[in-house]
């Protein structure tokens, strides 16, 4: 990894980049990948700028490594499939339990509100006889 001195040195290099290099830097990955639609001035700039050529070469090296990784097959460790399936099952059970708990709480809440409302209506009708006969 880079230390503090190296990082500040890299930051200084980025600040010292000429304006054209800073503007081209956003297009360099696309240039390295050979993508279409890149502004024509950036390939021309890269053709004459050693700093940007080096950066494009770095992107191309990274892309080569990534393509190699895409084609490689890595064997899964023993028991990995069983562990993934067990984790998925545990997550499904936990989600189901949480959903059931939420439904039960909703029912209890609704029952509580209904009971309280009925209690208030009964209390009001017994304490105010004029309300019981209106309707």
Image (cartoon, rainbow, N blue to C red):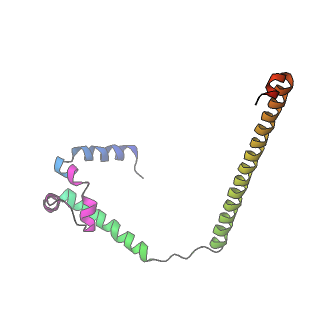
Residue 29 lies, with reference to residue 67, above or below; the image says above
Q: Residue furthest right?
A: 126
Q: From which residue to which does the magenta span run?
A: 22-49
Residue drawn 51% across the image and 75% down it? 74
Residue 76 lies, with reference to residue 6, above or below; the image says below
Residue 29 lies, with reference to residue 135, above or below; the image says below
Query: Could you tell me how many numbered marks the image carries?
Result: 0
Image quadrant where residue 15 sits? top left
Image quadrant where residue 135 sits? top right
Question: Who is closer to the viewer here, 41 or 77?
Answer: 41
Magenta span: predominant SS is: helix
In the rendered structure, does residue 134 fall within the stretch colored magenta?
A: no
Residue drawn 26% across the image and 62% down it? 30
The picture places residue 38, in percent across and down from the top left corner, at 20, 61
The picture places residue 125, in percent across and down from the top left corner, at 83, 27
The picture places residue 32, in percent across and down from the top left corner, at 26, 65
Question: Who is closer to the viewer here, 16 or 84?
Answer: 84
């Amino acid at each position: 990894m880079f230390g503090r001195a190296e990082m500040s040195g890299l930051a200084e290099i980025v600040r010292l980049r000429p304006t054209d290099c800073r503007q081209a830097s956003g297009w360099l990955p696309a240039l390295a990948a050979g993508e279409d639609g890149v502004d024509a001035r950036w390939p021309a700039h890269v053709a004459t700028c050693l700093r940007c050529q080096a950066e494009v070469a770095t992107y191309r090296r990274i892309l080569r490594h990534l393509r190699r990784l895409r084609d490689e097959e890595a064997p899964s460790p023993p028991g990995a499939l069983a562990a993934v399936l067990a984790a998925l099952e545990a997550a499904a059970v936990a989600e189901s339990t949480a959903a059931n708990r939420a439904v039960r709480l909703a029912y209890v809440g609704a029952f509580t509100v209904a009971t309280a409302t009925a209690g208030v209506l009964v209390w009001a009708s017994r304490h105010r006889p004029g309300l019981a006969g209106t309707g």
